[in-house]
Amino acid sequence: MGRLRYLTKRFALALPVIWLGTSFTWFAIFMGPIDPAAVLVGQADPQATDQYQAVREQLGLTQPPLQQYLQFMTDMLTFDLG
C-alpha cells in the first residue's frame, strides 16, 4: 500500500506543476510582445493585409483572452496540439 500512496501523492503534486507550466506557455505565446499572426505572415506591415486578418481569425486571436486560454487548455487536455 505504500507504493500506491507514494504514486498518488506524486501525481497530485505534479498536477499544479503541469497547470502552471502550460499557463505560462500560453501567457508567453499569446500575451507576449510578439504577435503570432504577424510572425506567421512575415511582412513589413502585416496588419494591412487580409492574410494577416485570416491568420488572426484562424489562431483565435480575435477572441477575448479568457476564451483563448480556455480553448488552449482544452486543446492541451485532448492532445490537440496542432
Image (cartoon, rainbow, N blue to C red):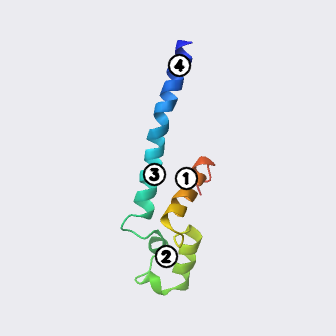
Q: Which residue has dot 3 on it?
A: 23
Sequence order check, earlier mark of 2 and 1:
2
Question: CA–CA distance between discs 4 and 2?
Answer: 51 Å
The extreme left residue here reads 33
Looking at the image, do the residues carrying marks 1 and 3 touch, with CB atoms under 8 Å apart?
Answer: yes
Mark 4 and mark 2 residues within 8 Å of each other at the beta carbon: no
Q: CA distance from mark 1 to mark 4?
A: 28 Å
**Mark 1 element type:** helix
Give, as a three-letter code, the residue at label 4: Arg
Quadrant housing residue 46: bottom left
The residue sitting at 50% across, 61% down in the picture is: 66
In front: label 2 or label 3:
3
Residue at the spot of label 2:
41
Image mark for residue 73: 1
Q: Earlier in the sequence, mark 2 or mark 3?
A: 3
Q: Which mark is residue 5?
A: 4
Vertical position of residue 76 compared to residue 39: above or below:
above
Distance from Cα at disc 3 to Cα at disc 4 = 28 Å
The quarter in which the C terminus is drawn is: bottom right
Say which amino acid is labelled 3.
Ser
User: Where residue 27 sits: x, y (%)?
Assistant: 42, 58
Relative placement, left or right, of 48 versus 32 is right
Q: Secondary structure at mark 2?
A: helix
CA distance for labels 1 and 3: 8 Å
Q: State if disc 3 and disc 2 touch (CB < 8 Å).
A: no
Name the N-terminal-most of marks 3 and 4. 4
